[in-house]
Image (cartoon, rainbow, N blue to C red):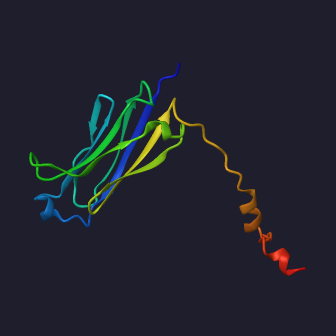
């Protein structure tokens, strides 16, 4: 049986609307904590209100249905970091196998952007039949239900 792996890329965040004083934050330094099962990873410390990390973490998943995935955003001076916003849980069975899926962590004043990729587990990707849309875009006419009533 193939190994099941969850790949999480923490891309960046933008918290430019965060009221630093309301949260008691004295320094604009932040990082993201990702926990899958018993393994916890942290990004490097980003400076400012819109740091870019583009850091990738891999986690072994024994059972996607029962393995918990949590992400939280931390900010503040070294040794005085505070959790900003809620810790969020992400459902692993909802991911599509081998397809990067955007996930956002909403925090007061902004969000953290991430991509989750399920390797060896997840739902199968389903092809969407968009031929009707393509016909319309290629200049084909789309008949509305009430159009045929007017012609009678």
Q: Position of residue 36 (x, y in %)?
A: 34, 33
Residue 125 picture quarter = top right
- Picture coordinates of residue 113, whole percent (x, y): 37, 53
Residue 58's quadrant in the figure?
top left
Q: Residue at x 80, y 71 (%)?
A: 143
Residue 38, placed above or below residue 15: above
Residue at the far top: name it: 1
Q: Residue at x 40, y 29 (%)?
A: 66
Q: Is residue 57 left or right of residue 142?
A: left
Q: Is residue 77 above or below residue 16?
A: above
Give the total of numbered labels.
0
- Residue 9 horizontal side relative to residue 124, left or right: left
Q: Is residue 3 left or right of residue 140?
A: left
- The residue sitting at 16% across, 63% down in the picture is 20
- Quadrant occupied by the C terminus: bottom right
Residue at position x 60%, y 37% from top? 124
Residue 67 in the image, given as x and y percentages of width and height: 38, 30
Residue 142 against residue 76 in the figure, above or below? below
In percent of width and height, residue 68 lies at 36, 34
């Amino acid at each position: 049986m193939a190994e099941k792996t969850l790949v999480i890329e923490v891309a960046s965040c933008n918290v430019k609307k965060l009221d630093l004083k309301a949260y008691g934050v004295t320094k604009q330094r932040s990082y993201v904590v990702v926990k899958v099962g018993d393994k916890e990873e942290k990004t490097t410390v980003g400076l400012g209100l819109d740091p870019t990390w583009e850091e990738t973490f891999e986690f072994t998943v024994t059972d996607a249905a029962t393995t918990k995935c949590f992400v939280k955003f931390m900010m503040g001076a070294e040794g005085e970091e505070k959790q900003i916003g809620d810790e969020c849980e992400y459902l692993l069975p909802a991911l599509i196998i081998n397809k990067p899926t955007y996930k956002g962590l909403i925090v007061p004043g902004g969000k953290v952007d991430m991509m989750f990729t399920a390797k060896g587990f997840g739902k199968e990707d389903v092809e969407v039949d968009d031929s009707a849309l393509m016909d319309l875009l290629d200049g084909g006419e789309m008949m509305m239900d009430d159009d045929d009533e007017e012609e009678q």
